[in-house]
Image (cartoon, helix red, strand yellow):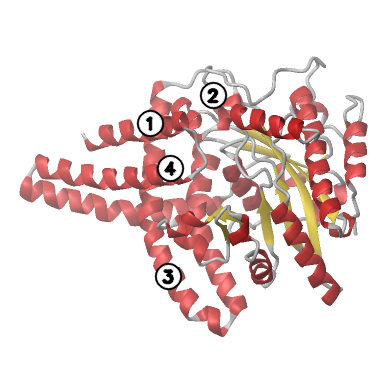
Amino acid sequence: MVVASEQQTNENIRKHVDVGDSIIPQDSVPKSKTEPADSRQDSDAPKGPAGSDQDVSTSRLLLLNLLTLTTIISFLWSGLTINLIQLINYLTVRHINFSLFTKINYCLMYSAWSQVIALFDWFFCTKLKVYHARKEQEDEIFEEHSIFLGNHGYELDWIGAWLVTDKYGQAAACKAMLKSDLKYLPVVGWSWAMSDQLFLDRNWEKDKHKFAGSMDQMLRYEPMVVTFFCEGTRFTKEKVEASQKFALERGMVAPKYHLIPRTKGFVAVMRHIKQRKRENPNLKIWLYNAEIAYEQSGAMNIGDIIRRGLSPVGHVYFERISIDSVPDDDKACAKWLQDLYLSKDKLQEHFNQYKCFPGHLDKRFVDYKPRLASLFNWTIWTLYTSIPLVYLIARLYIHYGTFLVSLVMSIFFLLSYVYLSYIIHQADVSEAEKKTITSSCTKTAKRAAT
């Protein structure tokens, strides 16, 4: 049992900041102690595989765009098949054997999500390193109910979370607080809606009654794995300025690299979970201070990754915290969360200086290799989608010629493009980033159609 308070968090970071501390991987510490610019600042230089400074060739960029488009098409059309099986499982098995329902649903969700995991793991060559505040946490993570309190500095955060949890065999188990509108989105939203995600209207009067029932439902999963992005939205220059103005007006200390966390939902969740622990002392639930950062500034948004062929290099830090260290009083609980996000600034400053986080490097990520399971799923679903499409195109070409083939392919790609555009519209993405992502896929779709 590891009990870590917020004060211990700050102390751990202060101890590990020293370059001489053996806990920092020596091959991760640059020879210069000069602090570089914040990794979130924009950069226009394309990066090669694994974050190198080599320019990406035109042929590789075209290949990556084609693979991205293929994955989008496969994810969309295979996802409808998966949704249908999920619905049958939800309406039947769930009411007979909940444990069996969760196992079947996990396999179905992994079959869908692994296509995206394969795209970034195998084709964009994303690399990740995971650090633990204590070495013993390496084998304890995901063993019991877990709530991860993450930062939201990059659009790529959710993909990084999938890639990391995939190595622990928990990629499809993760749950989160999501916008209510998302549950109506085909494939992605329908899948989440049948997996007991917590959907919020972002209106406290409507949402305050949802937390207790949703947490009780999540606790039925073994284990429960939930991620809370308490900042409520993604870190941008405009939003951090608004956050700092909010803090100044109220006499608060504002984080430098994070937004002020929204505390009402967290307080409601803690209040309910502590009540459940009092009713059942054997209930084991842990909090995790989770911080993610990428070496390339372009990893801030998926549009840059697609457009420039980036191979992101990410770093993730986990610190296990006893839920008993969170105060019972609502105001003190809110202050505890605000202090935690101030301590996250120290982690980000450490990363800016050393390009790594303090702590113990997880053995699973010393020699990072993609899992064959994700590539296998990607291949199966790509064939499932591509073979009927190629057969249809061949039949149309034989009987009707080039014009109808072009028309059918254009309609097929257009539907996939509309779906991607809708997802981006629903996501918390800036207009400039939306245009970058959609324009990259549109150009590739036009090339493929011609």
Residue found at x 40% / y 55%: 381
- Residue labelled with disc 4: 425
Residue 281 pos. (x, y %): 87, 73
- Residue labelled with disc 1: 440
- Residue labelled with disc 3: 85
Work out whether 63 lies above or below 140.
above
Tags 3 and 1 in contact by the CB under 8 Å rule? no
The C terminus, quarter of image = top left
Q: CA distance from mark 2 to mark 4?
A: 29 Å
Q: Residues within 10 Å of mark 4 (few under 14, many from 20)?
A: few
Residue 315 pos. (x, y %): 70, 36
Left or right of residue 38, residue 43 in this image: left
Residue found at x 63% / y 45%: 232
Q: What amino acid type should be assigned to the residue bearing mark 3?
A: Ile
Mark 1 vs mark 2: in front:
1
Left or right of residue 325, residue 417 in this image: left
Q: What amino acid type should be assigned to the residue bearing mark 1?
A: Ser
331, 420: nearer the viewer: 331
* SS for callout 1: helix
* SS for callout 2: loop
Q: What amino acid type should be assigned to the residue bearing mark 2?
A: Gly
Q: CA distance from mark 1 to mark 2?
A: 18 Å
- Residue labelled with disc 2: 48
**Quadrant assignment, res 369:** top right
